[in-house]
Structure formats: C-alpha cells, structure tokens
Amino acid sequence: MFILSSPSGAGKTTIARRLLAEDGAIAMSVSVTTRPPRPGEVDGKDYHFVSEAAFHQMVGDGELLEWAEVFGNHYGTPKSHIKAGLKDGRDFLFDIDWQGTQQLYQRMEVDVVRVFLLPPSIAALEQRLRCRGTDSDAVIEGRMARARSEISHWDGYDFVVVNDDIDDCFEKVRTILNAERMRRARQTGLVDFTRDLMRP
Amino acid sequence: MFILSSPSGAGKTTIARRLLAEDGAIAMSVSVTTRPPRPGEVDGKDYHFVSEAAFHQMVGDGELLEWAEVFGNHYGTPKSHIKAGLKDGRDFLFDIDWQGTQQLYQRMEVDVVRVFLLPPSIAALEQRLRCRGTDSDAVIEGRMARARSEISHWDGYDFVVVNDDIDDCFEKVRTILNAERMRRARQTGLVDFTRDLMRP
C-alpha cells in the first residue's frame, strides 16, 4: 500500500495520475466520500460518491480501512477490493491525508509505504491553489490554513519529496516505489529461489 | 552506509565500481586486509594491505568497525575516515560479506542499508568464477561451497536483487540508493524547511 499525502495544491493528484498511467502494477484505491462531485469527476473512478447515511452505515459495518472528516465531508477507504488485490500481489496507491495515513499505519497487518510531498515554498502553494480558479478567497484561505496544518504532520512519513519540478518529483516518487518493491520481505518468491541456489 | 554483499562471482565488484563512477556522492570504504594483492590491485585504493601483526594491532586498538576472517586472511573496515565522511554527509559503499554486515548492523549508532545480490542460477555463478581464470579447480570448489554458505544469509538483508543482467542490476541498486536517500530521517534540512513553510 503506497500512500501519497501532501497539502492540497502540492501536486499529489498529478503525480498519482502519472504513476497510475505509467506503472501497470499499481492501482488506485478509490475512496468513498460524502462530498459532492466536482466538475469532471466520475463516480466509481475518482470517488464513490455516497450519502451521509450510506457512509455511516459503512463505518458501522466495519467496511472501511480508514476514514476521516475534512471540511464537514467524509472520506474513507473501502476494505473489500483492497484486500482481494493485495492477495493477488497488486500494489495500491492511496491519495489520503495524514489522519487516514495514521489509521492505515496503525493496522499492523497491512504493509505500508508512506510518502509526503512538500511544496517548494508557501507562496508556490498559494499560487497553485489560486490557479485552479474554482474556489473563492475564503475557501483558499481555509485551504492555506489546512495546508499548514497538513504540513505539520510531515514527520509521520517514511519518505519526503519536495515538489520543485513536477517531472523530477515524479521520478523521485517512482524511484521510491520501485526500490520498496525490492525489499526482501516483499519478494515472496525468494525463499524457493534461494533454496534452489543452495541445493548441492 | 550502503552495504553490497553477494557470493563471489555474482557481480558485486562490477556494480560497486559503476556506482562509484556514476554517483559523486558515494565513496568506497577501503578495507584493510592481510591477503596478498592480486595482479593489478593498488594499495590504498583496492585495499590497505597490512601484515598479520599490524591487523591484530588495529583490532586491539579498536580501530576497526568490523572485521572477519575468510580463507585464513583477515579483512576489516577502519573507523577513522568513515566517521569523518559521514559527518560531512557523505555516503559510503561497503563491499563486505554477511559477517561484516552483521557486525556493522549491530552497532546501533550507524545508519545502514543492506543490499544482497544473487546470481540468476548456481550454474551461472560457477561459470563466472571459471571465466576469471585466475584460480585452480580446488579454489573454485572452495569458492562454490563458500558461495552457497554466503547465499544462506540472504535473509539478513533489507533488499535483494537478482543479477540476471548487469545493466538492469545496476539500475536497481542505484534505485535503492537514491530512494533510501529520500527517507525522511536522512534529510537533515527538513526540520528547518518545514518550519519555514508553516510560518504564517
């Protein structure tokens, strides 16, 4: 489970999309959310859009690996397809915040790599948030406050990458993913392979 | 401290040389040894060649980070220039066996990444040992026995890479090195950088 977190506007979504496009072995974990779709967002691809009632039902039934509330909306990760995919040796990409990361990490039975993206400066972050053009000043102010708060959790991650240049940042994130795949403990075939090598 | 171990003939020396040539931030840890120089080996570059007496003096004076005996010869890592280099933020490459790796790892004050290279098959390993052409059949037989014994310690490493193709293997080792440099705990500037980002 490969977790990518960052304050809003630090490039996480772009990096995540490129990773999914260029790496066939990783799939997106699609979250459920109670927030309304933004223009262009597709139900079942960007999010599973659900009602408050349906969300609370899922929490009650233990169907979410983690969940969090952001600006009055709820977000969560459904268990079922993740568990099935991991069994098949699939990697999953998580685009979640520090609260969700902590919840996932505290479940000891899951294997997690946590990557945090930082903006090169707070001015760059604000500019990126303004360029989206979809939000009012008040919303942007709220986002900046939230960004600072999100940044304060940088030390709860295994890796930190500063997104100074999007191509460079993407390469770094891909390097981390590929290296982590080479960890001994994640290569399930090695026990048999080394046994064959040592056979006299 | 980046440790590269493998059975003799699995390509470790080639990979180490390329890493040193293409990565300016890593330097070789030059070991001391009591074994006689092979043709072409340079004192102070490949090894520091010392007498048995001088070696035991270094052990006694606590000047070695780790040491081991292989085929009656002694090998060890001198402390002094490693400690100075690490302080300056330099990375060090170690071309040592599993015994040395264990000794280094057990020193809790050092920061170690352990990579083990495996041959694609035992036949490929034997062929590589024969191609060197410098050793008798008896020595090669000894090496093969030692290779099997070395391979049996594969599970004492953080990463395992199968050297099926030397270019591919090199890229994988470089990927691991670059990813490990992005670990939060190794980026000493992040405390100040994030403090600046969060300043209102």
Image: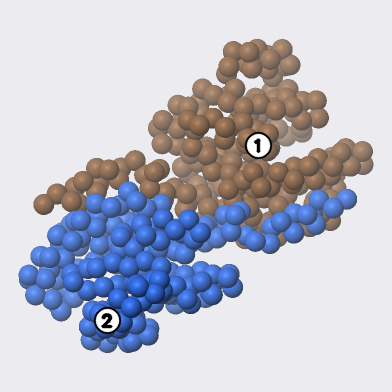
Chain colours: A blue, B brown
Residue in the picture at 51% in, 22% down: B80
Residue in the picture at 48% in, 73% down: A82
Q: How many marks?
A: 2
Task: Give the image location of residue A109, x and y in percent.
Answer: 51, 59
Q: Name above or below for residue A178 compared with residue A136.
A: above
Q: Disc 2: which chain? A: A
Q: Disc 1: which chain? A: B
Classify mark 2: residues with Cα within 10 Å, few (<14), some (14-19) or many (20+).
few
Task: Give the image location of residue B193, x and y in percent.
Answer: 25, 47
Tag 2–tag 1 contact (CB < 8 Å): no
| Mark 2 to mark 1 CA distance (whole Å) | 60 Å
Q: Which residue is mark 1?
A: B96
Task: Give the image location of residue B170, x and y in percent.
Answer: 60, 54
Note whether residue A107 is visible. yes
Q: Which residue is mark 2?
A: A53
Q: What amino acid type is highlighted by mark number 1?
A: Ile
**A135 vs B23, nearest the viewer:** A135
Q: Position of A8 compared to A130: left or right? A: right
Residue B150 tag number:
none
Residue in the picture at 66% in, 47% down: B155
**A83 vs A131, nearest the viewer:** A83
Quarter of the image where one finds residue B146? top right
Q: Position of B13 compared to A90: left or right? A: right
**A123 vs A148, nearest the viewer:** A148
Q: Secondary structure at mark 1?
A: loop
Q: What amino acid type is highlighted by mark number 2?
A: Ala
Task: Give the image location of residue B189, x and y in percent.
Answer: 30, 42
Q: Name above or below for residue B44 compared with residue A167.
A: above
